[in-house]
Image: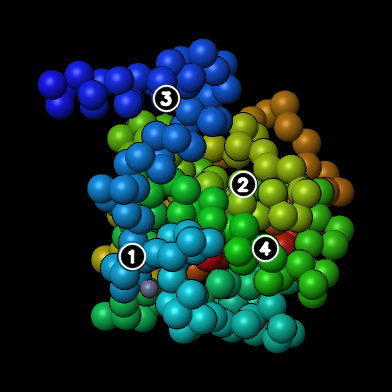
Amino acid sequence: MSKVINYYLFAPNLYLYIRNFNNLFAMKKWIVSFWSLFFPPCCVVCGRVLLDGEAHLCTSCNMDMPRTYFHLQEGNVAEQLFWGRIPIVRAASYFFYTKGSRFKNLLYDLKYHDNKELGYFMGRNMAKELQPTAFFEGIDVILPVPLHPARKRKRGYNQSELIARGVSHVSGVPVDVLSLYREVNSSTQTRKSTFERWENVEKVFALHPSCDFSNKHILLVDDVLTTGSSLWRVHRCLLLIRMYASAC
Ligand SMILES: [Zn+2]
């Protein structure tokens, strides 16, 4: 008897959504709401259940995030990494990553836990904070630092591209994911010394012959900024006169 009642109560909703199947957005929203009854979304940093209006990060962790505020400092540390190497105009980085910090979860979730939406979310949030400083003025195109196709296939996405798309959503600057590509599948950079990192990315990137970036101002986006070696190698590939760089 109870089985019949349950079926009867549930069926009208099911019917309604099947009728509106064309509206995939509504369908997705319904599934997410249903799912979240049993598996509520949690803050990726502290694990607390998120409140209405929060996404990925709880308000407390968002406020505590160790932001660099580089975009407010001319000649900041990120820019200094490129001095003498790239004729850079501006460089910024969203937050400090320190060993043992609970904010490392942001990167782990983005890179290794298939949390694609987090990349887009971080890119969008960073861009919202950069925009009032006119950081995006004069930029023609955004280039995310590419992964090698084999690695992208394995991971399923390029985290730098997700960040770039979030930045693009706020800034209105288009993202180009076709012109720049990675020729060599270099091994992971995380355990290499500074010198090895610079050596390791030598001649790793290439541009499709048909693309022309002459007189263009480019924003390069990478997920992590350590020695700046990847961005420098991309620059060598682009041979630009002026350049902007950014990393989360
Ligand atoms: Zn939190």
Q: Residues within 10 Å of mark 1 (few under 14, many from 20)?
A: some
SS at circle 3: helix
Whole-percent x, y for residue 156 in the image:
37, 35
The answer to which quarter of the image holds residue 171 is: bottom right
The residue shown at (67%, 63%) is 127
Q: Residues within 10 Å of mark 3 (few under 14, many from 20)?
A: few
Q: Which label lies toward us, 3 or 2?
A: 3
Q: Say which residue label 3 marks.
A: 13
Mark 4: is the Cβ under 8 angstroms from ligand 1?
Answer: no
Quote the CA–CA distance across marks 3 and 2. 35 Å
Residue lying furthest top in this view? 19
**Nearer-N-terminus badge (1/2):** 1
Q: Is residue 216 left or right of residue 195?
A: right
Quote the CA–CA distance across marks 3 and 4. 39 Å
Q: Amino acid at mark 1?
A: Val
Q: Say which residue label 4 marks.
A: 127
Q: Observer-nearest residue: 179 or 117?
A: 117
